[in-house]
Image: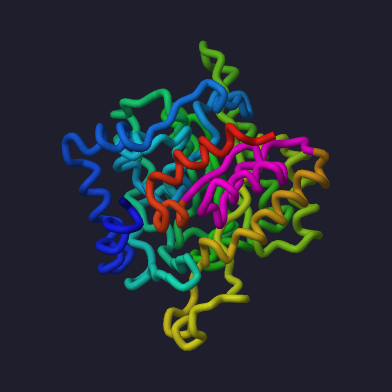
Amino acid sequence: MYTLLIRPILFLFPPETSHHIVASLLKIPGVSALLSLFYKYENPKLERSVFGLKFSNPVGLAAGFDKDADFFDEISECGFGFIEVGTVTPKPQPGNDKPRSFRLTADNALINRMGFNNKGAEAMVEKLKRRKNHKVIIGGNIGKNKITSNENASADYEFCFEKLFDHVDYFVVNVSSPNTPNLRALQEKEPLKKILSRLMEIRELRIKNSQLRITKPILLKIAPDLTNEQLDDIIEIVRETKIDGIVATNTTISRENLKSPISFLESIGAGGLSGKPLTKRSTEVIKYLSEKSNKSFPIIASGGIHSAEDAIEKLNAGASLVQLYTGFIYEGPGLVKKICKGVLTMK
């Protein structure tokens, strides 16, 4: 029904407008119940224990879809095992100028240069305090404000980490978006180690001072455009800082092998590409990290998952969990159920 009826209507509007329409529809009483009825699929064999957390199934919603934690409870009824909110920054910021999101329908892809538009960490906390569904794991994807220099970036990540600590189940450090100037420079070894080591210190202090036995895994989201040498550095950083895992991958700045006309791509301009064109590269990165690290840390796969086969390929390459974004937009909520059923048939 989605691809035949709903998607054609949503695709009549600009991507950002369609997103707001969906967000509004999710708030209508009864819509969540219908989503649960048609799309939620439960089976004990789908449960996964990863970095100390128990997931009801291995299919999640990637960061960027619910930037401000506005509708994570409602959209969880599509059957997701976990939902990542954000990217959130310490202070509210409007993001880049519109238009900033574009469909490449010929490629089953999107290009976006949103620029971490969000209402800030404190506003997100107020939303998370009203969380209803505690069965679904919630991750907090954290970033830095555009006006914050890279030299002071660690303070922004610390602020978001402290604010969200009691309200999310895990964290993802986002230094790989191509849409904040110079952000990807933080993927270099020394600045990245500084940020991650500091967050690990804060976590240990929080756990030590807590009366409860808690675990707040810290993951790093990386770009698909890293070289093998840079991926080797990432593996070393994970080992040295002892963070809990990797999200692979974010969007790409590459425009290779696209079906969309060059003139159309040039008219769009800069931005991160997501969707089917990223499927192969994302899997390559996952496989490389898994094999070179001897499977020493969990990987959440993100990038180009548009079918159960795509998800299974990522899991076979070494991922422990998978996340949807662009595939969810093109294929609809039924994709979650299809992947869950497909995972049960894996050998």
Rendered position, 195 above or below 272 = above
Give the residue displayed 60% in from the left and 18% down from the top.
208
Q: Quadrant of residue 41?
A: top left
Rendered position, 256 above or below 182 = below
Q: Position of residue 7 (x, y in %)?
A: 31, 59
Give the residue displayed 60% in from the left and 36% down from the top.
218
- In the image, 238 versus 347, the foreground residue is 347
Rendered position, 305 above or below 257 = above
In the picture as drawn, the residue positioned furthest to the top comes out as 211
Give the residue displayed 61% in from the left and 34% down from the top.
345
Q: Position of residue 317 (x, y in %)?
A: 72, 46
Colour convention of the picture: rainbow
Can residue 163 be seen here? no
In the picture as drawn, the residue positioned furthest to the bottom comes out as 263
Q: Position of residue 109 (x, y in %)?
A: 48, 66
Q: Which residues are magenta?
A: 295-324
Verify whether residue 315 appears in magenta. yes
Quadrant, the C terminus: top right
Can residue 182 be seen here? yes
Give the residue displayed 46% in from the left and 68% down from the top.
111
- In the image, 136 versus 231, the foreground residue is 136
Verify whether residue 262 appears in magenta. no
